Image: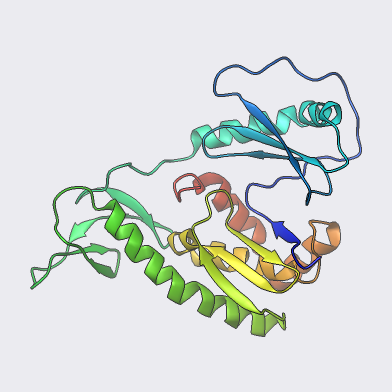
Amino acid sequence: MNDEQQDWFGQFTPARGVHLAPPPASPGPRQEIVFRRSARARSYRLSLGRDGVAVATIPVRGSMREAQRFVELNREWLDRARERQRRRPRTADVWAVGTTVLWRGEHAEIRPAAAGARPSVCLGADVFRVPKLEGDLRPVLEERFVRVAKIELPARAWELAAQTRMNVTRVCVRDQRSRWGSCTVAGVVSLNWRLVLTPEVVRDYIILHELMHLREMNHSARFWACVEEVFPRWREAEAWIKRNGGYAGL
């Protein structure tokens, strides 16, 4: 039980309890669906990765037949999710001076800082040192972002945990590729460093979302009532994530 973990981002639980029709025909290129069995999963789940590959999770007592039916039941949701993903803005692969990137919820241009002893660039009101102004700045800037995240995100998580009287044992900042955060029943909260790229409303929502899993380790109506109680703006945050999740690197 102590190893149980509730993930949020990328884990969608569409309509349950309905059995339907025959499985669909094999999807074409970029429409791949991967079926994976999970000893931890309690129900069938469908998620869409940033690479466009859908993953259907099969619980330990589940079957491939039922998983295929579950996918067919949620085919409309998957089509909508793929369309949202297609419409999301994407950040540039190479970051140079003049490139616009997401930083603290704003689309900020990488600008050279005032001349000094060491080269630096500005993103909004923040200044970051870089080895040089030429070439791809993305690796060094993302390294700086991670450093900021490891300071700011745990501090905010502990603050919100105290406000909501949640018993958190540890806060970790990680490089998660498919979710914004997670929380274990033992009180360990893991946060994606990319939360420093998002607006404060999104950052706080994700943290409080994970904290509320310490009350309800599921996504039941009772869980969402807890989220509503501590963060009524959660719908606004979710809308931002749907529009900009890809731009933030997820």
Which residue shows up at 60% across the image and 16% down it? 28
Q: Nearer the viewer, residue 200 or 128?
A: 128
User: In the drawing, does residue 169 fall left or right of residue 240?
Assistant: right
Indicate the position of residue 198 as horizontal and vertical percent values.
47, 60
Which residue shows up at 55% across the image and 70% down it? 172
Quadrant of the frame with the N terminus: bottom right
How does the figure colour the protein chain or chains? rainbow
Indicate the position of residue 89 as horizontal and vertical percent values.
43, 41
User: In the drawing, does residue 95 fall left or right of residue 62?
Assistant: left
Which residue shows up at 76% across the image and 61% down it? 4
Indicate the position of residue 13 as horizontal and vertical percent values.
77, 45
Asked if residue 209 shows in the view, the reply is no
User: In the drawing, does residue 221 fall left or right of residue 124?
Assistant: right
User: Looking at the image, is 234 positioned above or below residue 94?
Assistant: below
Which residue shows up at 68% across the image and 65% down it? 183
Residue 215 location, quadrant? bottom right
Indicate the position of residue 235 as horizontal and vertical percent values.
66, 56
User: In the drawing, does residue 102 fall left or right of residue 209?
Assistant: left
Q: How many labels does the image show?
A: 0
Asked if residue 23 shows in the view, the reply is yes
